[in-house]
Amino acid sequence: MEAENMYANILVPIDGSENAEKAVKEAIALAQIHHSKLHVVMVATDQRYIQYGVTLGQDVMDQFEKAADKTLQQAEDEIKAAGVAVETHYVVGIPKIQIAEKLPVTLKTDLTVMGKSGMSGISRAFLGSTTEYVVRHSESNVLVVEN
């Protein structure tokens, strides 16, 4: 397989964390070598949370979407400035399922580049590691970028 065709489409899930930013930089470098298109995605969970007796619902989802739009735009600007083709996607669903199983198929990606972690250790203990799930269940190859 020729290097330039090896990774035609690369999925880059981001969450606004420093680790996600490192993954974007790594994906840019790979895209420049392989002449790839980057698909940068933010996934909002479609599960509602009840915390301290208050249900966090549509208003929280609306706020997340606004923040996601800003984060996706920043990533898109950085990637375009590096001369790499990019599409951004905002998806609602269960993040680990979307990143590992659905998006690689629908976007026809060959590789997923993601940070080792994005949330705090306490959150990971309760929610499970998205990165670990993606590595175990992904429909494409996965590159995990060190913190």
Image: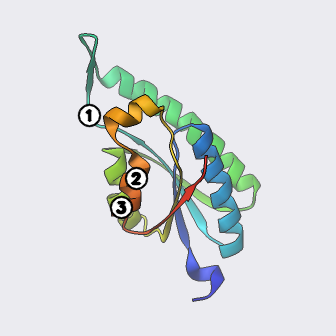
Q: Circles 2 and 1: CB distance less than 8 Å?
A: no
Q: Is residue 35 left or right of residue 8?
A: right
Q: Is residue 36 left or right of residue 114?
A: right
User: Could you tell me how many numbered marks the image carries?
Assistant: 3
| Mark 2 crowdedness (10 Å alpha carbons): few <14, some 14-19, many ≥20 | some
Q: In which quadrant is the N terminus drawn?
A: bottom right
Q: Amino acid at mark 2?
A: Glu
Q: Which mark is residue 136?
A: 3
| Camera-side residue of 120 and 94 | 120
**Amino acid at the residue labelled 3:** Arg
Q: Residue placed farthest to the bottom in the image?
A: 1
Tell me the element at label 1. loop
Residue 132 numbered tag: 2
Residue sitting at 54 percent across and 64 percent down? Answer: 10
Single out the mark in the foreground, 1 or 3.
3
Picture coordinates of residue 77, whole percent (x, y): 69, 47
